[in-house]
Image (cartoon, helix red, strand yellow):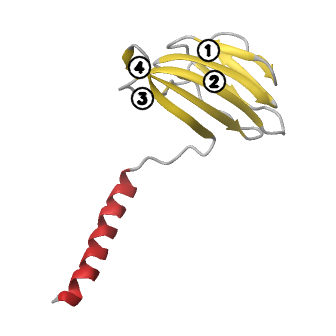
Amino acid sequence: MNKWIAPAIIVAAGMVAAAAWSQTPPANNNVVQYFTTPLEHDASRIVRLQTVNIPPKGGNEFHRHPGDQWAAVQEGEITFTIKGQPPRLLKAGDSVYIPRGTIHRNQNLSDKPARSVELVILDKDKPALENVAETN
């Protein structure tokens, strides 16, 4: 009887791990989060510092955040577009402030990688990003 305890525990642990793995959303390998912490004096919001790497010819779709965002380009060039406005080319050293709910996207239209550092203050219990359909 005792010889079946260890294998049973291993099988059970494997089943739990498989279930947890299947429920975990895929990681965004382009984003490195350095920290996420509650906003002082406002427990309903969080502060996050992260780096975003955009490969050549890469980018994201139009989206918005439930909070404010500050971004500074560290490497390469990023084409930043607020929906309904002309695109802006941001180069290393350039920065941008994106107010809560602003529909925007970031693209790397060059053949070299781009990287930015971002500070975001988000509502705690809401998804950090909401994709927005690209309609004219």
Comparing labels 3 and 1, the label whose residue is closer to the camera: 3
Which residue lies most toward the left here?
1
Q: The residue tagged with tag 2: helix, strand or loop?
A: strand
Q: The residue tagged with tag 4: helix, strand or loop?
A: strand
Are dots 3 and 4 in contact, CB under 8 Å? no
The span from disc 2 to disc 1 (Cα, nearest Å) is 8 Å
Estimate the x, y position of residue 109 in percent, counting from the top left: 78, 32
The span from disc 3 to disc 2 (Cα, nearest Å) is 17 Å
Are dots 3 and 2 in contact, CB under 8 Å? no
Estimate the x, y position of residue 136 in percent, counting from the top left: 59, 16
Q: Residue at x 34, y 69 (%)?
A: 14
Q: Which residue is mark 2?
A: 105
Q: What's the residue type where badge 4 is placed?
A: Arg
In front: 29, or 84? 29
Crowd class of label 4 (few under 14; some 14 to 19; many from 20; radius 10 Å): some
Estimate the x, y position of residue 133 in percent, counting from the top left: 52, 25
Is residue 59 placed above or below 10 in the rendered structure?
above
Comparing labels 4 and 1, the label whose residue is closer to the camera: 4
Task: Please give the label number shown on residue 127.
Answer: 3
Sequence-wise first label, 3 or 4: 4
Q: What's the residue type where badge 2 is placed?
A: Arg
Q: Which residue is mark 1?
A: 83
Sequence-wise first label, 3 or 1: 1
Q: Residue at x 50, y 14 (%)?
A: 101
Sequence-wise first label, 3 or 2: 2
Comparing labels 3 and 4, the label whose residue is closer to the camera: 4
